[in-house]
Amino acid sequence: MGEQHLNQIRYNIKQYKYQRSNLMQNHYKNQNIYIQVVKLNSITKAADSLSMSKSSVSRVLSQIENEWGSQLLIRSTRKISVTDAGKAVYLHFVKTIEDEKQTKKIIESSINTVSGTIRLTSPETFACHVLSPIITAFLDKYPEIKIELVISSDYEHLIEQGFDLAFRVGELGDSTLKARRLCKTKLGLFASIDYLKNKKKACKLEELNCLIYSGMPLHNQWLRALGEKDYSSVTGNVMSNSESFLIEMAKKGQGVLLFPERLLQKQLINGELEQVMKDYSSPISINAIYPYRTQQLSNKLRLFLDFVVEKIK
């Protein structure tokens, strides 16, 4: 399919949405005109109150009667009489407009409220060491908000599972989701000094006992070297979907861990772990991912996202 054809499809969709929006606006406008005529019992008074001409109001009334296939109003020189069908249509229009107003109020309240539940998902280590103090400070500031956090690194089905916001390490592959970068870090190899004592400094990645995180696809394929796209299949005697468990195993000298450097700051500062084979590192970002356009975010979610971004800087 050519680019010109795709552009035409996009244009047609945009036009359809525009025409549909105008049609709905005209529909509610005509209903309001009919309501005013019935309430004021006069086309002239209704036209004056709506700043319209009498002929325009009469044209709308005729259009509505044609749509319903029944005479709704009996016009005379002095007043208007409403038929039984006209009364039923009047009550229907009043209810429709009132329902529309109530729906708008609910939507506006949902967008502007600073109460309710925010459903989050995050990898374990990021949640424990980065998010937990941020969420604590946020809840102190906004006590009417509740946080529900699910520990996961899965990119799939974020929308279907009802998450408002997902924190993920790495690039976003699904273009239907939106991402906001929180910070940059490096993905590197880390091990304890005890483990390194028994290994040559120039050994190959394939020769190391790798502590494998099973919570991601292709969990046993690691980057070969900085700047290369080829992956190297690795092996190890420990595999787990718990990041904390793998970090503990690395600290105890059981193997090499592939992990974002920023999330190991405590272990690196304490000397429990150190980076090895620095050629096997690559830049990576930690992102906040959400299924909405920014202007559609609820107020509570926008407040939380901005709060997280500010604290992580």
Image (cartoon, helix red, strand yellow):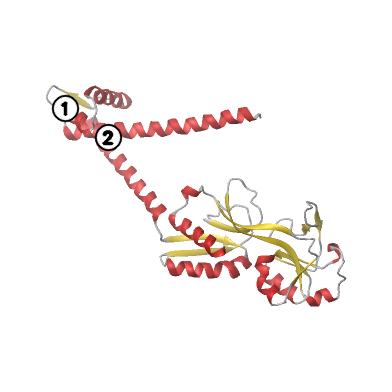
Answer with mark 1 or mark 2, whichever residue precedes in sequence: 2
265, above or below 176, in the image: below
Name the residue at the front extreme: 313
Residue 214 appears in the rendering = no
- Residue 216 image point, x, y percent: 69, 58
Residue that label 1 marks: 80
- Residue 311 image point, x, y percent: 53, 65
Q: Residues within 10 Å of mark 2 (few under 14, many from 20)?
A: some
Residue that label 2 marks: 32
183, above or below 255, in the image: above
The residue sitting at 56% across, 66% down in the picture is 131
Q: CA distance from mark 1 to mark 2?
A: 17 Å
Is 142 or 58 nearer to us in this picture? 142
Name the quadrant containing residue 81. Answer: top left
- Residue 301 image point, x, y percent: 47, 57
Name the quadrant containing residue 231. Answer: bottom right
Is 87 or 308 nearer to us in this picture? 308
Name the residue at the left extreme: 78
Q: Secondary structure at mark 1?
A: strand
The residue sitting at 86% across, 63% down in the picture is 204
Q: Residue 171, labelled with which disc?
A: none
Three-letter code, disc 2: Asn
The residue sitting at 78% across, 74% down in the picture is 254
Q: Secondary structure at mark 2?
A: helix
Three-letter code, disc 1: Ile
